[in-house]
Structures are given as C-alpha cells and as structure tokens.
Image: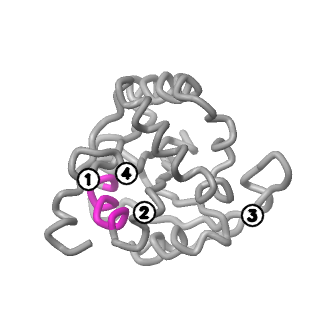
C-alpha cells in the first residue's frame, strides 16, 4: 500500500447496518485472529455480533468508550476502539484488529493519533493502554512504534477455551493534550 492509498483509510462509528459486512470480515480472518482474540469463536453468524453492537452503543452513550470501523475504499477492513478500564485514574484501553491481508502497511499506526486525540480530549483520559498477547509481534510493534512505554506483563490475561495467554501492557500518558 503506497502513501496515496493510506490517505484513503478512514475511521467511522459502527452502526447496526455494519453487522453483516463485519461478520464476513471476521469469517475471512477467523484463523488469523483466533490466537489473539478470545471472543472470535463466539461469532459464528452475523446475529452473534448483536450484543457487541449493543454494548458499543451503551459505551458511547455513557462516555465510557468508542468503537470504530476502519474503512478502505468504503469497505470495512478492521476495527479500532477504546474503553475505560480504570475509572478512578481515567485510564482507557485501546484495541484493534485488521484484515490479515493489510497487516504491515502502517494502517493502525496512521489512525492511532486520531484515536488518542479523541480519548485524551473528548473522554478526558489520563492515559491509554495497549494490552496485547506477548506473542503478537505486530501489536507489540504498533505499541512501541507509537511511543507507548512497556509497563508490565499480566499473566493469563487472555482466556481462551483451551488455554490462556500472558499480555504485555504498554501505556502512553496524556502529556501532549
């Protein structure tokens, strides 16, 4: 993906009408996402996303987080979002996933500054954390390349049906906003 194509990347709020397209993308990427996202096995049909969409609407309504679709040429290619995980300290957790065919093109890194601005200004966050499986090389690189500082390892953070995984915690404070 060249620089001009990166300018065609957009971010927009999820709406219920996205359910079918989002499901097709999850279905296409299921085997790729499965080692990193414990919820992936719970999404077997478009209707399985209903609870997620309902929770997303409640998060947004209560100013506790946001979920966005990532678009390329008006097609959904992934998701990015954040939610509060420490009310007292106003720390939000950032999560994302992308179509496996588009990994390594800097797409997530190109969106993170906009997400940070929303999180720090609109949601008054004191810090943003990225928590990723220790074996998820791409996500660890995204955190490092976007100046998130390594904080710790949380044992057994991601719980899958057959096993659990440790995660690395990276954090960026609200200094620039």
Please tell me the numbered disc located at residue 173. Answer: 2
Which residue has dot 4 on it? 77
Question: Foreground mark, 2 or 1?
Answer: 1
* Residue positioned 54% across, 72% down in the render: 140
Residues under numbered marks 4 and 1 in contact, where contact means CB atoms less than 8 Å apart: yes
Magenta span of residues = 107-116
Please tell me the numbered disc located at residue 72. Answer: 1
Which residue has dot 3 on it? 166
From the viewer's perspective, is 71 left or right of 149?
left
| Magenta segment, prevailing SS (helix, strand or loop) | helix
Mark 2 vs mark 1, CA separation in Å = 30 Å
* Residue positioned 44% across, 65% down in the render: 172
Mark 3 vs mark 1, CA separation in Å = 32 Å
Residue 131 screen position, x and y as percent: 59, 60
Element carrying mark 4: strand
Residues under numbered marks 3 and 1 in contact, where contact means CB atoms less than 8 Å apart: no
Residue 104 screen position, x and y as percent: 41, 73
Element carrying mark 3: strand
Between disc 4 and disc 3, whose residue precedes?
Answer: 4
């Amino acid at each position: 993906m060249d620089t001009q194509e990166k300018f065609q990347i957009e971010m927009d709020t999820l709406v219920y009408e996205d359910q079918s397209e989002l499901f097709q993308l999850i279905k296409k990427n299921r085997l790729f996402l499965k080692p990193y996202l414990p919820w992936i096995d719970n999404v077997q049909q478009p209707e399985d996303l209903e609870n997620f969409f309902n929770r997303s609407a409640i998060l947004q309504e209560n100013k506790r987080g946001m979920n966005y679709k990532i678009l390329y040429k008006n097609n959904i290619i992934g998701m990015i979002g954040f939610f509060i995980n420490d009310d007292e300290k106003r720390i939000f957790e950032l999560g994302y996933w992308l179509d496996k065919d588009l990994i390594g093109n800097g797409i997530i890194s190109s969106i993170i500054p906009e997400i940070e601005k929303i999180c720090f200004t609109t949601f008054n966050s004191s810090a943003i954390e990225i928590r990723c499986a220790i074996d998820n090389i791409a996500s660890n690189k995204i955190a490092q390349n976007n100046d998130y500082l390594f904080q710790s390892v949380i044992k057994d953070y991601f719980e899958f049906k057959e096993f659990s995984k440790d995660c690395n915690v990276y954090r960026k404070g609200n200094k620039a906003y």
